[in-house]
Amino acid sequence: MSTSILTNTVASTLSRFPMPAMWTKGSVQQRTLMMGVALAVLSNVLFGVLYAYSSFLAPLSGTQVFIWRMLAMWAALVGYLLISGRLGFHIDKLKALGSVKQWAWLLLPTPIFLSQFWLFMWAPVNGQGVQTAMGYFLFPLMMVVFGCVLFGEKLSRLQWLAVAFAAVGVGSEIVRTQSVSWATLWVCGTYPVYYILRRLQGIGAVTGLLIDLTIFAPFALAYLFFIAPSSLSLVSGSGFFIAMLVGLGVMSVLAMKTNVDASQMLPMNVYGMMSYLEPALLFILAITVLGNPFESAMIYSYGLIWVGIACLIVHGVRQLRRAHQQSQTTEIAPVI
């Protein structure tokens, strides 16, 4: 869906509901921006709730919750696409793949996606919540590095400074602990690879999600029937667990959908800055709700990484202001 069509759709949708004055005044672009910010906040809050979801489903293990989440997400996503009439669109895109090589290239990122979702559900209840949240903090910085190395993107001074602070912070943590968490490295080291591969393939977020979940669904069912039948018995015999898992699937798809919609409504700089809300929530939840350990000595190394994140945010704000000034200059320029 193009930006102009999406903007008009948002405007017509908002006009049907009684909205506060701040949502109805101003241009369509301003209202779209506000709606995009609201969707981005909602998406990040939902991801935060999902991070703590495993703790509500005891005695299911983190791996078992991951398995159930994948199945619930697949059912919720297929149901949504059927109701919205978009399932055929995504199937047609897959039918266009005519060779084994194209399919192999398409499925290459799937193991990364699955491992990241497994870690997301496993880490909070296994003492790796803080370390995984830190991986999500480092993820935008690694995307900057990957963009520089693979796509020849030029970095500003603030971006170089952000990378330098993060590198020193990670180095400080390695010196302090004589190691670095594998969970942190896995998130920030492999998730960028997934997004880059999907970008090179030209696959949209929803299509990629449908592929990944559909491929994994038979393996998830086999796991429940042959490896963890006790989990299957527990869930099938409990209305509470069934309701919680239905909520898990719906919430997961809603989080992904609002995140994708926000990315289409917002300028990339704004969307990038909003993405820092999620790891901040994950970090807070890991320490407070989930009780994951946080040592005072970690403040120094993690503080340096947060300084790097702050540099990226300042860079994004500057770019946004520059783009706004240029648009204003264009609007008031005399017609010759």
Image: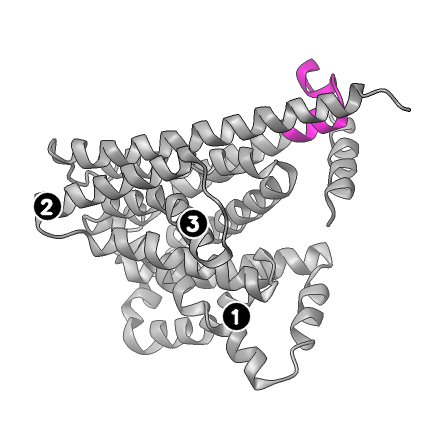
Residues drawn in magenta: 19-34
Mark in front: 3 vs 1: 3
- Residue positioned 57% across, 56% down in the render: 205
Query: Which quadrant of the rendered structure holds the C terminus?
Result: top right
Instruction: Residue 300 in the image: state x and y as whole percent.
Output: 17, 32
Query: What is the secondary structure assignment of the residue under circle 3?
Result: helix
Query: What is the secondary structure assignment of the residue under circle 2?
Result: helix
Instruction: Residue 49 in the image: state x and y as whole percent.
Output: 39, 40
Which residue corresponds to mark 1? 214
- Residue positioned 47% across, 48% down in the render: 247
Q: Nearer the viewer, residue 100 or 13?
A: 100
Instruction: Residue 313 in the image: state x and y as whole percent.
Output: 44, 30
Q: Is residue 118 above or below residue 32?
A: below
Q: Nearer the viewer, residue 195 or 84?
A: 195
**Amino acid at the residue labelled 1:** Thr
Q: Is residue 215 left or right of residue 184?
A: right
Q: Is residue 58 left or right of residue 23?
A: left
Q: Is residue 147 left or right of residue 290?
A: right
- In space, the residues marked 3 and 1 are separated at their CA atoms by 27 Å
Please rate how many residues cluster around mark 2, counting C-alpha atoms within 10 Å: few if below 14, some from 14 to 19, many from 20. Answer: few
Q: Main secondary structure of the magenta part?
A: helix
- Marked residue nearer the N-terminal end (1 or 2): 2
Q: Is residue 265 above or below residue 132?
A: above
Query: Which image quarter: residue 28?
Result: top right
As drawn, the label of residue 143 is 3
- In space, the residues marked 2 and 3 are separated at their CA atoms by 24 Å
